[in-house]
Image (cartoon, grey):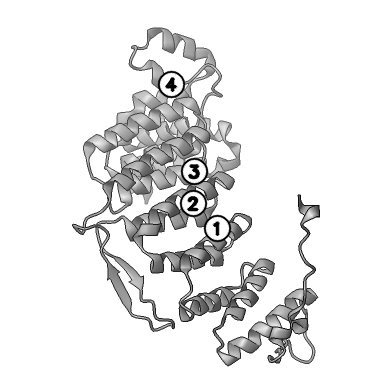
Amino acid sequence: MEFLNPEPPYVLFRDRPEWSDVTPIAQDDGPTPLAPILYSDKYKDATSYFRAIYVAKEYSPRVLDLTLEIIKQNASHYTVWQYRYRTLLALNSPLTQELHLLSKLLPTHLKSYQAWNHRRLLLLQLGKKSARGELAFAEIALAKDAKNYHTWVYREWLLCNFFAPAPAITTSPAAGEDAEPAIEELDEDGGADEEVWREEVVFTDRMLEDDVRNNSVWHHRFFVLFEGPRAKQSPDVAESEIEYTKHKIALAPNNASSWNYLRGILSHTRTPLPLLLPFARPYTLPQSAQSSLRAFADPGELPFLPGEKAQLPCVAALEFVADALAEEGKPEAGGVYDELVQRDPVRKQFWEYRKRSLQSASAPVGAQA
């Protein structure tokens, strides 16, 4: 228990014998600072010693202790992170230990871009053998914050840098800004690890099972299947994903993320919106009309119909139908935009603009002038 093993009292660096040879450099805010920041004594003490070792270009084990203390107090101090990285390389320190240390720090600093960038630099040194474990670490981090932008960007970077059909660029072990890049072959045959990308689709399945409204997961799934370096431009993939998305929409009809994903697939594959009108129309009807639809629907259509607890009509479905009708040049689109004005008054002016644009496009050239 913590009270049986209390942490020793904190000692300022100016009171530590091993730092007695260093003259700290205080922050210079000028003679009359307009709005000085009230740093704590601990932070002012540590950063003053950091400025001194930075000027002296010292790379030593005690620098690692100093930078770690500052990072604990301010995980967004980019200069400290960068100097720590250079020190690790200069000392030829075991980077796996640094990775483990960072794994303990990151859960409380998931919003720190600098912390994630430090981890990225370590992986460039450690190479692909450590990358698979990093995908697992990223999943653990997402379990803590499933929509954290930095974690998703890091995961995408891992996939592209270590599992893409091209060699990864890593930095050389030499310290310094001018380190020459080195080429690391991703696989013995120089190809990509396709299994990792297949597992990534399964990973997004798990994430959407937990939260079907997580837009970050939908975005990542689209990247993996349609935009990433292992994306396969296959009609079968697109058709399968359309069916998958229709199931998810039936589960949560008012989820904008799944509707946007559906539109993304159609746009990417240049599939006309009107082809999905039979699917979208039931979601534009009130719940009172759904029992009749279910009674006369074919068995294969039932899984794609709104559930009994769905809040209908669905604004996203109305927008989809309006845009599909407009794509066909049908005047009925104007009536759907009118309904959107009533159902979605926050964007009233936008829907009115869309209707005017529709009318302008259909008017004769002379009338437009």
Residue 295 lies left or right of residue 46; in this view the side is left
Circle 3 or circle 1, nearest the eye: 1
Q: Secondary structure at mark 2?
A: helix
Q: Which of the labelled discs sits on residue 324, or is there none?
A: none
Q: Nearer the viewer, mark 4 or mark 3?
A: 3
> In the image, what residue type sits under mark 3?
Asn
Q: Which residue in the structure is indicated by mark 2?
A: 137
Task: Evaluate if marks 1 and 2 touch, with contact meaning CB atoms under 8 Å apart.
Answer: yes
**Can you tell which of label 4 and label 1 is closer to the viewer?**
1
- How packed mark 4 is, by other alpha carbons closer than 10 Å (few <14, some 14-19, many 20 or more), is many
Q: Find out whether the residues at labels 4 and 3 contact each other: C-beta distance under 8 Å.
A: no
Mark closer to the chain start, 2 or 3: 2
Answer whether labels 4 and 1 touch (C-beta < 8 Å).
no
Secondary structure of the residue carrying numbered label 1: helix
Q: Is residue 291 above or below residue 260?
A: above
In this orientation, does residue 38 appear? no
Secondary element at image label 4: helix
The CA distance from mark 1 to mark 2 is: 8 Å
